[in-house]
Image (cartoon, helix red, strand yellow):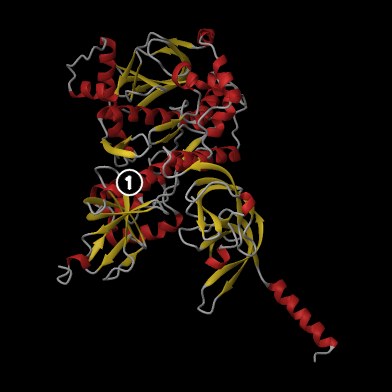
Amino acid sequence: MLDANSLAALSSLKSTIVESKIVYTGTAKGSQGRFGFIKCEQNGEDFFVPPAEMDKILPGDRVEFESTTDNKGKTFAVVTRVIQTDLKQFVGQYQIKGNAHLVAPEDSLISRQFFIAPKDRKGSNQDYVVAQVTRHPFPDGKAQAKITKIIGNKGSAFLEHALTKTRFGLEDEFPLAVSSQASAYKEDFIAQQLPKRADLSSVPFVTIDGASTKDMDDALWATANEQGYQLMVAIADPAAWIAPASAVDKEALHRATSTYLPGQTHHMLPARLAHNLCSLVPGFQRLAIVLNIQLTHEGDVSDFGIEAAVIKSQAKLAYDTVNTFIDQPSAKLGLSADVIGSLTVLNTIATLLRTQRAKHHILMPDRDDFRYTLDDMGKIMTITIDPRSPSRNLVEECMLLANRLGAQFLAQHQTGVFATQAGLRKERVEDIQSVLAEDAPELAHLDPTQLADFVTLVNQCEQQHPALFLLLLKSLTRTEMKNVAAPHFAQGFEAYATITSPIRRYADLANHRVLHKILAGDENLALDEAWVSGLQQRILQSRQAGNAVEQWLKCLYMDNFQDVEYEGVVHYINGMGFGVQLPHNGVDGFVNLKGLTPKSQFDSKRLQHQIGDTTVSLGMVVRVVAQGADMGRKQVQFQWLDHPSNNSPAAA
């Protein structure tokens, strides 16, 4: 037996061992599998969390953990305490397995099911429901929830829309206080503002939008002069109507942006404002912020000004109408001489602006849009391509210019909501420099972390090294919003801030408020960094909602085309396989290379797969056959018909 002194010594040794262990803190991240990761706050590293440990926590949890090593030398995290959890409720599918009632979360990053106690059950097998977390899984991995709402089942119309809207907190109706405030706005407010603004009602502005668009937030006019060209961009001015912290403003900030789901739009502002009082409806005076821009004959900006004004649009033109005019200038299309003259100059200006962007900045490849026709159940019946057109390019060039100049104006006053893009992801810089040295040594002297060099690099690669060009685009960070000006590498701009869609985007509305303050000489201009970060997070959620519905519906749509062969383009590559996009309908699918022979060798530096003598790279055209969808991941599955195993003599 150990004597008292020995026991004391052993106890002291145990205390020393415990005290010597390093305890970290971090945030848990889920994965498509049962494992996960913890982003360490102390060193920024991602620690692997094996399934047994991931069962105890939820994605988003802030935890304490220790790092340990298994007998194979692999390091992983062991969770010791949950500091904070944010997952209070979720949407998922009700499942009955034997006597157990469970809910499987719709979020694929939550790779666990929640037990539903008898008193908390509601609904039936396969229903989609809202569930509230009643028991966190730490420390024993046993998680529970109760059903608070039934959303529907697979037979419900527009189920995918309803489920996603609930998941991301999108409300169909505006709160009563918001509707009441919107109803109280009077059109005579515009006339009251006229003495305080420039009266540009006689300028023959026109709007150019889709035929069904009602929230028209920009109008254009242009003319030629001795210095080159004068361009006016008029932007709707909801900031003049909406008082900060009012009911309408609070709801607009909560929504952050208009959210576009297939077949449905959730507007940021009530229809009375978005479609009427703020919209640049032809024939009616409307409040606007106007950029008056002087361009040289080559399309460079020689001067510009910004002012609050009242305008009156002369016509609402559809893209197709403007396309017809551009293709056939002699076709009058019932337009006035003033409008025809302006459109002619606008088309010239757009060509010059695009040429200047190609010369001094970066032209990203044009991407076609796709339109969905839905049936009465909210499922896709057809997908049609909506290709880029001259009229869309015309509007885009004018809006890009207005946003750049708006950013320049805001940056001079050191405030605003700026869209920034920091260039290459940090972990990709060294790989890109290595590939340049090996494949394009004449460009290896360029520093991709510097804006000017990056612009030169991208443009040179597009012309001379298309594979490198695509690799650069796939190595970019996400766009972020900041309260200080910073470069937008992906566009090649020194600064960029969106101001042209204040009816649809709260960031633009916020920038308009700053513009009004600057024009009024108000020096209280600061925007809080945390506020801008929160706005960005809400915008991201809106985009995620739109993408989630779209991808779900595409998966269901492609179930109708199993075993159909297609040609597609490789547009992303990871260690498991590669993504393929079908050009005729925009559907993305995945080719999983796991288990195929010969085995692939993945080149993470070049983002390529080497399978025998075949190299799969970005931009490559491949033949695939549709194989349905992985509905858990909402991912269309393709089989690669050009894989060497399919073309071998044995396979034949």
Q: Quadrant of residue 5?
A: bottom right
Residue 198: x, y in percent? 47, 11
412 or 589: nearer the viewer: 589
Q: How many marks?
A: 1
Q: Residue furthest bottom?
A: 1
Residue 184: x, y in percent? 57, 14
477 or 146: nearer the viewer: 146
Residue 599, placed above or below residue 220: below
Q: Amino acid at mark 1?
A: Thr
Q: What quarter of the picture does the N terminus occupy?
A: bottom right
- Residue located at (26% from left, 51% from top): 569
Q: Is residue 54 left or right of residue 354?
A: right
**Which residue was labeled with disc 1?**
456
Residue 48: x, y in percent? 52, 65
- Residue located at (28% from left, 11% from top): 338
Residue 367, placed above or below residue 506: below
498 or 17: nearer the viewer: 17
Q: Quadrant of residue 242?
A: top right
Residue 165, placed above or below residue 604: above
- Residue located at (32% from left, 41% from top): 364
Q: Is residue 122 left or right of residue 257?
A: right
